Image (cartoon, rainbow, N blue to C red):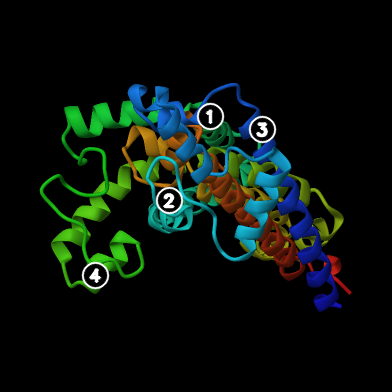
Amino acid sequence: MLLTYLGRRMVLAVVALFGVVLTAFLVAHSVPADPLATVLSEQATKDPSIRAAYVKRWGLDRTLPEQFGAYLANVLRGDLGESFTTRRPVLQDLKQFLPATVELSLAALAVAVCFGVPLGVWAAVHHNRLPDHAARAVSLVGAASPIFWTGLIALYVFYYLLEWAPGPGRLDSHQTMPPRVTGFLLVDSLAAGNLELFASALRHLILPALVLGWFILGIIARTTRSSLLEVLATDYVRTARAKGLGEGLVVGFHALRNALIPVVTIIGLTFAGLLSGAVLTETVFAWPGIGRYAVTASTRLDYPAILGVTMLTAVIYITVNLIVDLLYGVLDPRIRVR
């Protein structure tokens, strides 16, 4: 039954989440560096009383098992700890930075799916002909181009030379954030009735979304092409053609639905990766998302922030994998859970 399957997956998800958090905890604490050196000034670090106070405050005087046990107990109460860097609860930081990443990820995924799937279908239908070669070249360049390089080139061309796009950031420098309702800038600006702010936020979103979507587009297009080619060679597709069905109906209805199963997997995992933080894109475009927050936490040995981002990433991947598994049954009834 479906409920049994979901229950089993939830148990496995909890086990996987525990393993991820334990691994991240051990790796973070194995780094041979002093986290207080990045938080305190040089003079404060040398003061034994100040150092002892901060060590006790963050529980760094305990053994690793004691620290991990205390962390798990706090997590069960909904407390992810306090960031060494921002001096705020990690959960509050995640709530602040996650919407920016989600907004960018959804826009990039929309670009990749809307262009990548048709491009892959077009290449498969015109197999080994000029459209196929052109589509493969586009997807190969997209998948092989480093995101940071593409982002810098895009900024140089469209922002500096042509002045078609605004600079890095989510808003123009003279504008202020609207009252926070959802954290999504496009939604909050509309909720505030500020169309000028909405237009500015949309302009700033387009270029990083295209850069990030361009990279994902190549992966989705190549996966769609190879999967559809495999399905088009099956017996039931040849039978449908022999019955006189139009090529559009054969490809669009009979073949594409089964070919989308591996594509859905790629889309799901890609989206999970985007939500966990498109680090390079957010860095190049000064996008205040989870990626930049994770980089800052890592460079400063901010243990609570590192573990918070790791847990968020694990939850996202586990959730997306569960959704993808359920979508398999929708696309292909033969693999539905009984």
Quadrant holding the C terminus: bottom right
Name which residue type carries label 1.
Ala
Name which residue type carries label 3.
Val
Q: Say above or below: 220 vs 300.
A: below
Q: Looking at this view, name the residue that lies furthest to the right.
A: 338
Name which residue type carries label 2.
Thr
Report the Cα–Cα distance between label 4 and label 3.
Answer: 43 Å
Query: Which quadrant would residue 322 be assigned to in this image?
Result: bottom right
The answer to the question of whether label 4 and label 2 lie on touching residues, with beta carbons closer than 8 A, is no
Q: Which residue is mark 2?
A: 101
The crowding category of the residue bearing disc 3, from other C-alpha atoms within 10 Å (few below 14, some 14 to 19, many at least 20), is: few
Q: Which of the two labelled residues, at mark 4 and mark 2, occupies the earlier sequence position?
A: 2
In terms of secondary structure, where does tag 2 sit?
helix
The answer to the question of whether label 4 and label 3 lie on touching residues, with beta carbons closer than 8 A, is no
Report the Cα–Cα distance between label 1 and label 4.
Answer: 40 Å
Mark number, residue 137: 1
Report the Cα–Cα distance between label 4 and label 2.
Answer: 19 Å
Camera-side residue: 319 or 165? 319
Q: Which residue is mark 4?
A: 190
Report the Cα–Cα distance between label 2 and label 1.
Answer: 29 Å
Mark number, residue 27: 3
Q: Which of the two labelled residues, at mark 3 and mark 2, occupies the earlier sequence position?
A: 3
